[in-house]
Image (cartoon, rainbow, N blue to C red):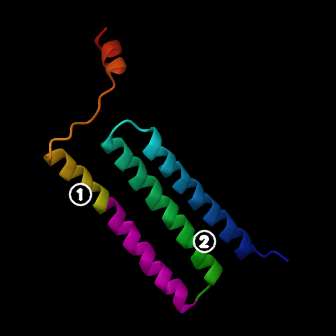
Amino acid sequence: MIDITSILTIVFVAAGIFFLLIGSVGIIRLPDFYSRTHATSKSDTLGMMLVIIGLIIFEGLTINSGKLFLILLFILLANPVGAHALARAALHAGLKPTLNKKNEETNDS
């Protein structure tokens, strides 16, 4: 019989996989480095957090769930800081963001 913890685990892990997939599509579809970095940092952080929360629910109150929680905190802090450092290094290296010329032409009119 399926209990509530199994259902919550499946929902959280499936939602996390969905956000990880969206981040992967963002790498392919977005035009420049800054957009790609933003898409992956936001969606991958959320996706990994949801997957780990699902695993914590599945595991229950054990030492393993405590370790998963510490990993969750590390991901929550490290992913945005790493993405910011990459974007800042790219800006200092002279990489300019790609601007959409079509939107510039319509705004000038």
How many numbered marks, from 0 up?
A: 2
Q: Residue at x 49, y 65 (%)?
A: 48
80, 5: nearer the viewer: 80
Q: Is residue 24 above or below residue 62?
A: above
Q: Please report the residue visible at 47 percent of the width from the left and 79 percent of the height from the top.
A: 69
Which residue corresponds to the image point at 32% horizontal and 14% vertical from the top-left?
105
Up-down relation of residue 18 to residue 60 (above or below): above
* Viewer-closest of 79 and 8: 79
Quadrant containing the C terminus is top left
Direction right: furthest residue: 1
Secondary structure type for disc 2: helix
- Residue 54 marker: 2
Instruction: Name the spot of residue 87 as percent of width and height, x first.
Output: 25, 50
Q: Main secondary structure of the magenta part?
A: helix
Instruction: State whether residue 87 is above or below residue 103.
Output: below
Compare marks 2 and 1 and give the one earlier in the sequence: 2
10 Å neighbourhood of mark 2: few (<14), some, or many (≥20)?
many
Q: Quadrant of residue 84?
A: bottom left
| Left or right side of 58 for 88 | left
Q: Residue furthest top?
A: 109
Query: Image point 35% across, 49% down: which residue?
Result: 37
Q: Is residue 103 magenta?
A: no
Q: In the rendered structure, which amino acid carries the disc numbered 2?
A: Gly
Q: Secondary structure at mark 1?
A: helix
Label 1: which residue? 85
Bounds of the magenta span?
62-80
Disc on res. 25: none
The percent position of residue 47, horizontal first and vertical second, equals: 51, 60
Q: Amino acid at mark 1?
A: Ala
Q: Report the mark closest to the observer, 2 or 1.
A: 1
